[in-house]
Amino acid sequence: MSASKLIKGKNIVLRPYTQKDFKLIHQWVINPQVTKVTGEPVDISLSKLTKSYKEKIKGNYYLLFMIDFKNITIGYCNIFYHYRNPKSKIVDIGICIGEMEYWGKGLGKDTLTTLMNYAFDILNMEETTVTYNLTNKRMKGLATKIGFKKTKWEIESAKITKENFRETDKQFPIKK
Ligand SMILES: CC(C)(COP(=O)(O)OP(=O)(O)OC[C@H]1O[C@@H](n2cnc3c(N)ncnc32)[C@H](O)[C@@H]1OP(=O)(O)O)[C@@H](O)C(=O)NCCC(=O)NCCS
């Protein structure tokens, strides 16, 4: 599955990936400072990584977006239909801001909120989940802030309905 349009957040824009973006994704994935808390393999080759993404996208259960901020590509994010089922009403959202200088500036929240609005309003999802390691304090803080409720302890997983998302989104608006 491939998204064709731009999705505008408050300060970020989510755009469809292009072939050359895989080089960027690879740089971020192999940077242990970026991915040490995510559990992603850091020693993967560019060709293996590109192939794995292309396989996923072909499968009709996966959407990949690049995150642009002020015309700079700072990371990527994705939507993964549960059980690899394109008819599922639950999707898992993944997010990686690979350019570390952009961490802690509200862009992760902007990205996650934008993707959730897209998942609930455009894809008509009933629930979204996020999955992260317990050591990932930043992601845990972000998920908690947005209102996700924990469902598992080992690898932490959290979920939220559209209704609950709307409630917390009103309480913590993104600053322009
Ligand atoms: C995790 C990640 C997406 C967070 O995005 P971010 O832009 O750094 O986070 P934000 O600035 O949007 O912060 C949003 C909220 O998260 C929480 N948060 C941010 N940094 C935190 C930290 N170091 N510790 C605890 N909570 C934190 C805060 O509650 C914050 O809200 P507030 O500033 O209004 O209090 C980003 O840092 C990233 O991509 N990291 C590397 C890859 C990764 O870990 N991806 C997630 C894998 S599942």
Image (cartoon, rainbow, N blue to C red):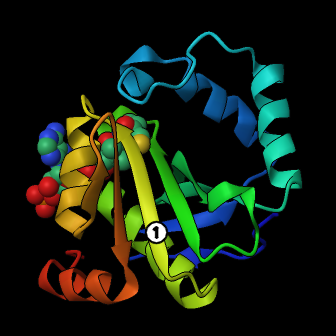
Q: Residue at x 80, y 64 (%)?
A: 2
Q: Please state the horizontal and vertical placement of residue 14, each as a whole percent of the image.
A: 57, 65
Quarter of the image containing the C terminus? Answer: bottom left
Residue annotated with mark 1: 128
Q: Quadrant of the image for the N terminus?
A: bottom right
For the point 37% across and 19% down, the residue is: 33
Ligand 1 within 8 angstroms of badge 1 C-beta: no
Taking the image as drawn, is residue 53 in sight? Answer: yes
Name the residue nearer the viewer: 23 or 164.
Answer: 164
User: Relative to residue 27, is residue 19 depicted above or below?
Assistant: below
Judge whether residue 19 can be spotted in this image. Answer: no
Report the amino acid beneath label 1: Thr
Residue 62 in the image, given as x and y percentages of width and height:
72, 57
Q: Please tell me which residue lies in front, 112 or 69.
A: 112
Q: Is residue 57 left or right of residue 63?
A: right
**In the image shown, does 89 or 62 lie closer to the viewer?**
89
Q: Position of residue 81 (x, y in %)?
A: 65, 62
| 19 left or right, relative to 94 | right
Q: Position of residue 120 (x, y in %)?
A: 51, 84
Q: Which residue is depicted at the point 56% across and 65% down?
A: 91
Q: Total label count? A: 1
